[in-house]
Amino acid sequence: MADSKEGSAGDPPAAHLREHGITIDATKLVPTSWWQVPGVTPSIWNSDPESLDAPKTSERRELRLKPGKYKFISFTFDFPFTVNLNGTLDFSKSLDQCVEGRGTQALVVVCKRMYPYGGQRDAYYDQKPNDG
């Protein structure tokens, strides 16, 4: 007699429960600071900067995120982003001047502040980050 069990422990999780490796890259932000994704990384608001566990903008960080809506938060701005069922990123087209990575698994933040205007990026954002 064949034993057919649906949803056994060996089956892969449903698409909405599957975690995806999403890289957050804020290394282009100058000067170095901290960032957070609420509910996933430590808060940047309630800690002493000397002992802060939140990710620094000087390093790329891979997060394990399930499909859903999230928010990137730094001290100077924040914006929402979505992890789709296939593990790729989406965010508002209005952020294209300062955020890259739509359709990929790497969210790249390239601006320290965001201003809603249609002009070119300020030369300020072309500075190279410190290594410290």
Image (spheres, rainbow, N blue to C red):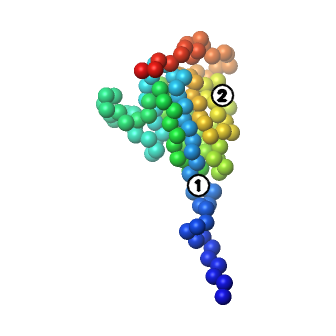
Q: Quadrant of residue 55?
A: top left
User: Mark 2: which amino acid?
Assistant: Asp
- Residue drawn at (56%, 38%) of the image: 23
Picture disc at residue 96 = 2
The answer to whether residue 39 is left or right of residue 119 is: left
The answer to whether residue 57 is left or right of residue 102 is: left
- Residue drawn at (51%, 43%) of the image: 63
Q: Earlier in the sequence, mark 1 or mark 2?
A: 1
Quadrant of the frame with the N terminus: bottom right
Quadrant of the frame with the C terminus: top left
Q: Quadrant of residue 120?
A: top right
- Using the image, determine if residue 40 lies above or below residue 114: below
- Using the image, determine if residue 27 lies above or below residue 103: above
Mark yes or no: residue 49 visible: yes
Mark 2, residues whose alpha carbon is within 10 Å: few (<14), some, or many (≥20)?
Answer: few
Of helix, strand and loop, which one carries label 2? loop
Picture disc at residue 18 = 1
Disc 1 versus disc 2: nearer the observer:
1
Q: Nearer the viewer, residue 34 or 96?
A: 34
Per the model, the C-alpha gap separating discs 1 and 2 is 27 Å
Mark 1, residues whose alpha carbon is within 10 Å: few (<14), some, or many (≥20)?
Answer: some
Q: Position of residue 59 (x, y in %)?
A: 48, 30
- Using the image, determine if residue 106 lies above or below residue 57: below
User: Mark 1: which amino acid?
Assistant: Arg
Residue reaching furthest to the bottom: 1
The answer to whether residue 59 is left or right of residue 3 is: left
